[in-house]
Image (cartoon, coloured by chain):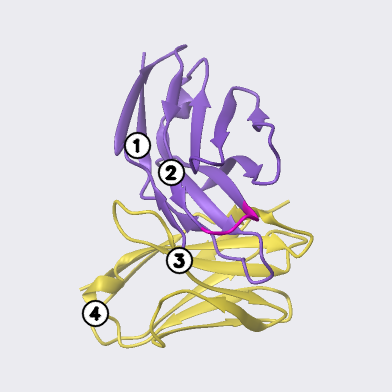
Amino acid sequence: AQTVTQSQPEMSVQEAETVTLSCTYDTSESDYYLFWYKQPPSRQMILVIRQEAYKQQNATENRFSVNFQKAAKSFSLKISDSQLGDAAMYFCAYRSGGGSGYALNFGKGTSLLVTP
Amino acid sequence: DAGVTQSPTHLIKTRGQQVTLRCSPKSGHDTVSWYQQALGQGPQFIFQYYEEEERQRGNFPDRFSGHQFPNYSSELNVNALLLGDSALYLCASSSYRDYNEQFFGPGTRLTVL
């Protein structure tokens, strides 16, 4: 089974600064998808950004971007111009691209604190 | 457009009891997945329902079962509750057109005493 590792239980960033959250994964598959989800204190999980493994270009969504290093099996999330509303748990997730790959495999999460 | 809804919000049960959690998917979605999120952990996949059938199952015992109705809503049933079943249970819906777009509900917090 694929495993997803988030080695930073907690991170802190000041407003307007940039922070990078780390994620590594273990897989023997060549076709897969990677995601970053945000879970604010209200609990509802929100998709932040996604990356298809076959795409070499790193995904970007406004202030959020990823650094996808396929050979290193690394998928980090960069948040630029951090805002107070970015404070949340962030989960990295993996989904197989095969015909039976419907489940999301999540890491343990990184708690992001944003200070004024 | 209502997103994914779950009921109840909170639930307290005792060991050995049975519980049923409910989920209504986002409008236009036909697939429902269930996840268990223990305190301080990432969600763990329980199973997914599509066309009223269980399509994929995670590493959970048979005490966990589910159902999907013709209107795509779904139930998660847990029998013979254990203390370790205490968790946040999340429902996620998606469409067969794009399984990468999974929308999560707010969850049901289950406490087993």
Instruction: Please tell me which residue is depicted at 72% across the width and 80% down the height of the picture.
Output: B51
Whether residue A43 appears in this view of the structure is no
Q: Tell which circle, 3 or 1, labels the residue nearer the N-terminal end.
A: 3
Residue at label 4? B14
B55 with respect to B46 (left or right): right
Disc 1 is attached to a residue of which chain?
A
Q: In the figure, the yellow chain has which letter?
A: B
Q: Are marks 1 and 4 on the same chain?
A: no
Task: Please name which of the two marks, 4 or 2, marks the residue nearer to the observer.
Answer: 2
Q: Position of residue A12 (x, y in %)?
A: 33, 24
Q: Camera-side residue: A77 or B85?
A: A77
Disc 4 is attached to a residue of which chain?
B
A74 with respect to A55 (left or right): left
Q: Name the quarter where the C terminus of chain A is drawn.
A: top left
Residue at label 1? A111
Q: CA distance from mark 2 to mark 1?
A: 16 Å
Q: Are marks 2 and 1 in contact (CB under 8 Å)?
A: no
Q: Residue A37: within the magenta? A: no
Q: CA distance from mark 1 to mark 4?
A: 31 Å
Task: Please name which of the two marks, 3 or 4, marks the residue nearer to the observer.
Answer: 3
Q: CA distance from mark 3 to mark 4?
A: 33 Å
Q: Residues within 10 Å of mark 4 (few under 14, many from 20)?
A: some
What color was chain A assigned in the picture? purple
Q: Is residue A12 above or below residue A90?
A: above
Residue A24 is labelled as: 2
